[in-house]
Amino acid sequence: MQMFISFFAGERCDRRNYCEGNPCRNGGSCISTTGGYRCGCPEGFHGNKCELDINECHLNPCVRGKCINEFGSYRCDCPHDFTGRNCETLLFNIDPCSTSPCHNNAKCYTYRDKYYSCECRPGNLFSFYYN
């Protein structure tokens, strides 16, 4: 079986098919134009043939983490208490009273998700702490 590649198209085979063999890289789609071609690049790439990686970290996508550029994409290295593609979600919200910081049967109250205060029993003092 003999195989050949045709670089011509059209009703009379008189138009050159510049997209034959797909010159676009990294999943780019070739669009044949008069006298040449143009590549439609997928997200994460640019250049005449989609051969260049875009450094998405220049756009500062990571809300609270460190951006690491990857081939065709990026990832965020999030601090331990954040998650999500861009470190935008608080992983957990620890109630400062959950560790029972108040002593002698004092009542613990949480304020603004990270502060606590101890309401002491009669005869003791009131205290306010930052967790």
Image (spheres, rainbow, N blue to C red):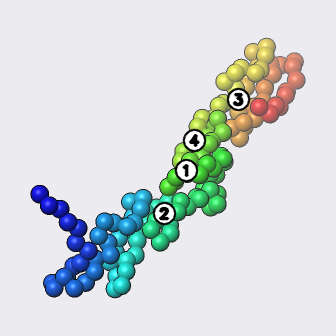
- Residue at screen point 34% across, 85% down: 34
- Residue at screen point 61% across, 48% down: 68
- Which residue is tagged 1? 70
- Which residue is tagged 2? 51
| Amino acid at circle 4 | Thr
- Which residue is tagged 4? 83
| Amino acid at circle 2 | Glu
Q: Residues within 10 Å of mark 3 (few under 14, many from 20)?
A: many
- Asked which secondary structure carries label 1, the reply is strand
Q: Nearer the viewer, residue 42 or 103?
A: 42
Q: Is residue 29 left or right of residue 14?
A: right
| Amino acid at circle 3 | Pro
Sequence-earlier tag: 3 or 1: 1
- Which residue is tagged 3? 96
- Residue at screen point 83% across, 19% down: 122
Task: Give the foreground label among 2 and 4.
Answer: 2
Sequence-earlier tag: 2 or 4: 2
- Residue at screen point 88% across, 23% down: 125
| Amino acid at circle 1 | Glu
